[in-house]
Amino acid sequence: MLPHPEKPEDIGPYTLMRIDTHGNKFPIVAGVSEAFAKAAIAKLTENVHKQHYWYEIPQKPQQP
């Protein structure tokens, strides 16, 4: 299970994402720091069952 950020330094603008074998993208946790996201990816990819994980800063919707 992935921990949620608890320390102030774990908070940031990033969202940790996952893509499944069908190409569906899912946010795992939002509002985390880059360091937290990197550590979470390292922990998640320790498993034998591999999926693709990445982090990004979500784009704000364009105003009309």
Image (cartoon, rainbow, N blue to C red):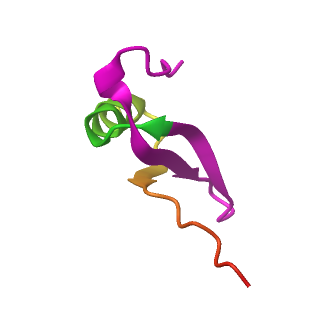
Task: Give the number of callouts.
Answer: 0
Quadrant into which the C terminus falls = bottom right
Indicate left or right for 36 with 44 as reference.
left
In the figure, 49 relative to 57: above or below? above
Q: Residue furthest top?
A: 6
Which quarter of the figure has residue 25? bottom right
Location of residue 33 in the rendering, given as x and y in whole percent from the top left corner: 34, 37
Q: Residue furthest front?
A: 64
Q: Tell me which residue sits at (48%, 18%) in the image.
A: 3
Q: Tell me which residue sits at (58%, 39%) in the image.
A: 28
Location of residue 30 in the rendering, given as x and y in whole percent from the top left corner: 54, 40
Quadrant into which the N terminus falls = top right
| Residue 26 lies in the magenta-colored region | yes
Which quarter of the figure has residue 47? top left
- Which stretch appears magenta? 1-30
Q: Residue furthest right?
A: 64
In the figure, 37 relative to 15: above or below? above
Which quarter of the figure has residue 29? top right
| Residue 5 lies in the magenta-colored region | yes
Location of residue 38 in the rendering, given as x and y in whole percent from the top left corner: 29, 39
Q: Tell me which residue sits at (64%, 65%) in the image.
A: 23
In the figure, 57 relative to 11: above or below? below
Q: Tell me which residue sits at (52%, 49%) in the image.
A: 17
Q: Nearer the viewer, residue 64 or 57?
A: 64
Indicate left or right for 19 with 52 as reference.
right
